[in-house]
Image (tube, helix red, strand yellow):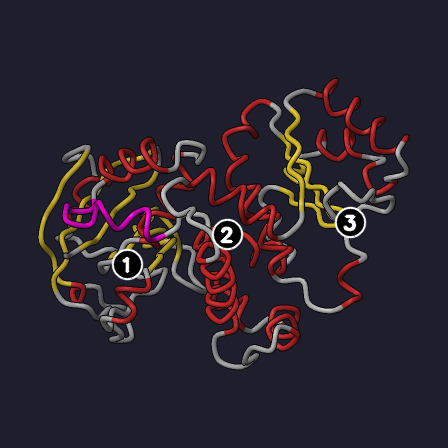
Amino acid sequence: MTERLNSNLTIKTLAYDLGLPPKGDPVSEIVKFCQSRVKKMLSEMDCTQDSSSILSLVAAKLDTEFIEVATAQETLQVQKQFVTAGETGLAQLQREFANGVLGITVLRLKKKPFERKYISVINCWGRSAERSYFTKWHELIHLLTLTDQSRLSFRRTHVVCDKKDPEETLMDVVAGHVAFHPPLVKPYAKRNLSFELIEEIRAAVFPEASRTAAMIGIPKAWPHPAVLIRAALAPKRFSSELQLRATEVSVNQAATDDGVFAIRNFRVPEDSVIHEVFTGKANRAEAVEEMEQWISSDGTQWVGGEFVVRATRMGDCVQAILSRN
C-alpha cells in the first residue's frame, strides 16, 4: 500500500505543499512531519503519560472540538443544533454516518469568540465506537497536514475501507504511527514483544484504542526491530494458484534502521512456524527464524538475520510478530 501511495500524484503534491521532498518516500516524510509537530506540541506542556490527555492536547492545539455521537437520534440532534447555528457543513450528518462515514471535520462558518475553529464529529454508532480513538487521530492528521489558505475552507469525511481515496488512505497510515506515542510504549521494551504484551499495553496505556489498531500501532512504536505479518492464501502476480503468502507486511522504524528488508506477497517458507500454524499443526507457535529464508522465485530474499517469530491463527489467516531486543 505504501508503495502505491509513494507514487501517487496527490500524495507527492501534499508533500510538496508541506515543504517536504516529494520524490523518494513522501509517505515517510509526511509521517515524520506529523510526528515532529506532535512532539513539539507535547514539549510545550507536561502531558506525556496519558494517551487521552495527549489526544485532547493535540486537538486543542489544532483548534478542533470533538463531538461523539452514539445513536442516529443523537446524531440528528447534533445536526439540527449546528445547522440552526449556521453550520451547513453538517446538514447531512445523520445520512452520512448511516452510510458508513466514521468522522467529519468542518471549519466553523459562524464561529463565536469562545469556540474552536473546527468541529470534528465522531461516529460511535454500534461497533464504530471501537474505532473512535483511531478516527479522532485520523481527523487530527487532516488538520496537521493543512497547508495553505485554500485548505482552510475545508471539509473532510472519513469512510471505513475508503481505499480509492489516496489522501484518506494516507491519513490512516499516518494515524497508525502517531496515535501510539512511542514514549508511552518504551517502558515495556525490556520485555519481549508478544500478542499478550500488546494487549497489556493497549489496556493499560491506550484503553480507547481498538485491539486491531493496537496490533498495528504498538509494533510500529516499539523501540526495537519488529515486523508484523498477516499470512493468507493468495495468488502470485499473473497467476491464479493460491499459496500461503505474506499478504500484509509492516516493518517498524527500528527494523528499517537496522537494515531489515521485508515486502508483501512473498511465499511463506514451509519450515516456518507461520506455515505450521496455518496448516493446523498448532493454534499458536514460536521459534527463532532467519529472515533470509524468505526467498522469492526470482531469487530476491528478505534481509534481517534472526528474529523470534510468534504466530497465531486468526480466522482464515495467520498473524505473526517478528521481534528481537
Check the image and report above or below for 305 versus 154. below
Q: Which amino acid does label 3 sit on?
A: Leu
Tell me the distance, in whole angstroms, between the alpha carbons under discs 2 and 1.
29 Å
Q: Which amino acid does label 1 sit on?
A: Arg
User: Label 1: which residue?
Assistant: 267
Judging depth in this view, the residue of 250 and 121 nearest the camera is 121
- Where the C terminus falls, by quadrant? bottom left
Write the residue at 41% across / 38% down: 212
Q: At which x and y percent is residue 281? A: 14, 35
Check the image and report above or below for 171 versus 110. below
User: Label 3: which residue?
Assistant: 107
The mark nearer the N terminus, 1 or 3, is 3
Q: Badges 1 and 3: C-beta atoms under 8 Å apart?
A: no
Q: How crowded is mark 2: few (under 14 residues within 10 Å), some or many (20 or more)?
A: many
User: Label 2: which residue?
Assistant: 175
Bounds of the magenta span? 182-193
Write the residue at 33% across / 40% down: 317
Q: Which amino acid does label 2 sit on?
A: Ala
Write the residue at 76% across / 46% down: 106
Q: Badges 2 and 1: C-beta atoms under 8 Å apart?
A: no
Judging depth in this view, the residue of 303 and 235 nearest the camera is 303
